[in-house]
Amino acid sequence: MAILSKEEAKQILEKALSFSRADQCEVNLDGNNSGNIRYARNTISTSGMRSNIELVVQSNFGKKSGVATINELDDESLAKVVKRSEEIARLSPENPEFMGVLGPQTYANSKTYFDATANINPDFRAKVAADSIQPAKSKDITAAGFFNDSAGFSAMLNSKGLFAYERQTSMEFTVTMRSSDGTGSGWSTRDYNDVSKFDSAMASQIAIDKCLQSRTPKAIEPGKYTVILEPAASIGLLQNMLFNMDARSADEGRSFLSKKGGGTKLGEKMFDERVTIYSDPLNAEVPASTWAGDGQALKKMNWVENGVVKNMFYSRYWAEQKGVAPVPGPSNGIMMGGDASLEDLIKDTQKGVLVTRTWYIRTVDPQTLLYTGLTRDGTFYIENGQLKHPVKNFRFNESPIIMLNNLEALGKPQRINGNLVPPMKVRDFTFTSLSDAI
Amino acid sequence: MKRRDFLHVAGLGAGALALPIPIMGAPIDPEELLNPGISVAAKKELADAALNTARSAGASYADVRIGRYLNQYVITRENKVQNVVNTESFGAGIRVIVNGTWGFASTNEVNQESIVAATQQAAAIAKANSKYQDDPVKLAPVKSQGEVSWKTPIQKNAFEIPISEKVELLLEANAKAMENGANFMNNFLFLVNEQKYFASMDNSYIDQDIHRIWSTFTATAIDPDSGKFQSRQGLGGPMGMGYEWMDGKAEDKIAGPAGTGLNLYKNSYDIVEDAIAGAKQAKSMLKAKSVEAGKYSLVLEPNHLGLTIHESVGHPLELDRVLGYEANYAGTSFATLDKWKTKSFKYGSPIVNLVADKTQENSLGQVGYDDEGVPTKRWYLVKDGILVNYQAIRDQAHIIGEDESHGCCYSQSWNDVQFQRMPNVSLEPGKEPLSVDDLVKDVEKGIYIAGRGSYSIDQQRYNFQFGGTVFYEIKDGKIVGQLRDVAYQSNTQEFWNSCSKICDESDYRLFGSFFDGKGQPSQISSVSHGSSTTRFDDVNVINTARKI
């Protein structure tokens, strides 16, 4: 499937809309090509290509709504899918929370598409794997990794004249390096919109170094420790917190942002004053979509500023109920930090634990945002500003609210999974048991 | 976070896409779900075109899957229907081996030209990768099946039940729960139908029609004075059944231990009754005693224990994990080949028998043939406490000295490559007659846990932590009251060796999950785990309450 241009996409959407007989109609078109390669045991295991295009038609009669989609784009199919969505709308019960479609919006242009990523071929992917496997083999290490690239477009048009279009590319790479004796494991990840920033050998070397350093870890007692969390160690907790900043849940009394006796914690200081978290689709390092699936514009938005809860997200329905402007959810997450490198943070630490990444994070208590999970692929004891020795992995039970109150220092933010997160030093992080896993 | 991931999780975006969980597929109208699609003869013709193309491209093996995947969701909260969505996804995936290397490609255009092009693309990928391949694929043989078909033995096709009937049932459950103390109610009905056609160079042409169903709720109670809230999920799991699962027949109900007032569900689910109980229990949990951390005997109900079996037995005994193929994502396994080869590795106590089974009736994993054309079967993983086998597919069987696949290969769609997935893994019931009340009677200090809760386990499946849906304190052989803030932490081998009693077959039932995740790109799979209520001793329980 070709990535359709703005004009090509608009033409198809206009054609579809021309068949509509509903009170309101909104049409979305998404197409995507992706390729992947997977390797393990120092050899390539599975690899494939996926391609799909989808036209989504939403028709409304009053507050009755129906949706149908199709993946053929000839005139007959377009007429059929519009008619089908209208039939479902007539059969559906009214949804009192249904909001009409939006009128025209203005969107900024975010740079999310790069030809280099869109042009990746099977030979490129095979070389990514080879550049990772070869250096591992030479050190008696076993490599397992995954590279996935994707190029696509999204467009929408509705009966009130709203039109939006964007193209996006992305790539993600993860690699795990394990020592042949099974006593050490290291990991690293990279993700970009522009693949020309990516170097498989360099990313793999970080995992190899972690693997070699992490061999034969010693057990230390679980308990409360000062920790240095690399971005991959804190991102899971931060994302989970951000996902839970929905205004409706807070107003309904079932959120960490709900207040005793009613109301929400909007405007209250909940975290250390150095904590500022925002989203910005125009950030050059983590470019993201500038419009949401319902056509709302996505702009820079502060969620936490100097430790104070500044915004929650409001669906259009809930915003109307509360008499406020809707706030769409974030398209990325950016946490401000400082200039210190990870090495600087380690150097300034008397006693502590360095955590490369965390894994299998699950909610324990939604009220306090208590999460459990484990450290993985490189956990080290720090003494007098140096990595003293690797330690066995821990299970943690901790809340990002407590974590962001116990901040000691922040480093320079790095890209992780489409977000920017600084390495952070945190006191009294709660490890509750030891794991033998390597 | 990725925009689309977020929109899915947060339930934002266009109404059409505002599903609570990521799914693939495209909404269509209800009547079209019953349309059988293209004929078996037409599928065979297309499949043969792919197989011939693969041969010409030098493939030593190829298989084709032409799939039509249907879902239906009915989603409600309190007295409102939030969404009714029908989705359909149709396409073909072709897998080849060229130069001893796998290649895969798929197309959403099911015609001869596109299928031939996808086959050529799969072969080109295999050739590009074979330059770096030094461990050529070895497939265990499989008998030609000829032209065969299989269907989930359902009584009522859930897709044929009118939407109004489903909406009425869900809204009734919500209304009854609100009358009984819930401040908020969310529930949904989720139906799956996989219409899968498989053909391979082994001269197998297999047509299958697979059905699954899931309905559950979350009842939430709020205490505005303290600012606290508690939720209770439904206790009926997903099943490999038709709409008969929603019949809620009296003979399918099993009472929980005396003093709990719980009703639990075997072969049909009474969602209205469970919603009423759920509302009451969510409310009473607000005032329940916070658990004192320490060692307890745990009495685990099957709809809870199933998840523990899944994480601590199902996953570590997947052979691809053991071998390192999942090292970069889900992880590896403590249950290494060395331990298995000793034939004396004590996975559990002698009463522990864990069995893998792709043929079990009403289960989510039940199919006639797996996604590489192998007839399904049942086999032991742990026998009398000893580790005896793994889960293996065609390209792995030779590694454990077997000459046939176990028949547990699966792909979530036509668009993804198939690989080894967990079959149903179940704990066999105790051989001696033993009821739940008999089991509780001997417990001095314990906790009875029903339903699934929070779950987390390390990447080699040693250390785990599980919560639950409802908890009851046991003192001197009696249930004395509800508890909250409970989670237990243990080590897999220690835990299964602390298994001291298992109720008999009359208490046996299935837990299930629609969302077992594995692989890169990540795929989901549905799986059931059967057990009877089981006791484990001296397990470490922590208190999860925190002040923020």
Image: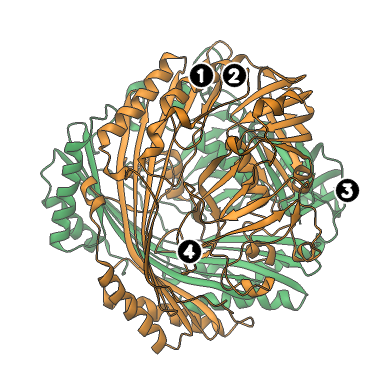
Q: Quadrant of residue B502?
A: top right
In space, the residues marked 2 and 1 are separated at their CA atoms by 9 Å
Q: Which residue carries the number 1 mark?
A: B221
Q: Which residue carries the number 2 mark?
A: B285
Residues A405 and B521: in front is B521
**Which amino acid, by three-letter code, is at mark 4?**
Asp
Quadrant, the C terminus of chain B: top right
Q: Secondary structure at mark 1?
A: strand
As drawn, is A252 to the left or to the right of B107?
right
Chain in orange in the render: B
**Which amino acid, by three-letter code, is at mark 2?**
Met
Residue A383, labelled with which disc?
3
In space, the residues marked 2 and 4 are separated at their CA atoms by 43 Å
In space, the residues marked 2 and 3 are separated at their CA atoms by 44 Å
Residue at x-position 87% and y-position 52%:
A218
User: Do the residues at pointers 4 and 1 share their chain?
Assistant: yes
Residues B383 and A38: in front is B383
Q: Position of residue B441 (x, y in %)?
A: 73, 23
In space, the residues marked 1 and 3 are separated at their CA atoms by 47 Å
Residue mark closest to the camera, 2 vs 3: 2
Q: Are marks 2 and 3 in contact (CB under 8 Å)?
A: no
User: Do the residues at pointers 2 and 3 share their chain?
Assistant: no
**Which amino acid, by three-letter code, is at mark 1?**
Ala
Q: Secondary structure at mark 3?
A: strand
Residue mark closest to the camera, 1 vs 3: 1
Residue mark closest to the camera, 3 vs 4: 4
The correct choice, above or below, for B358 with respect to B466 in the image is below
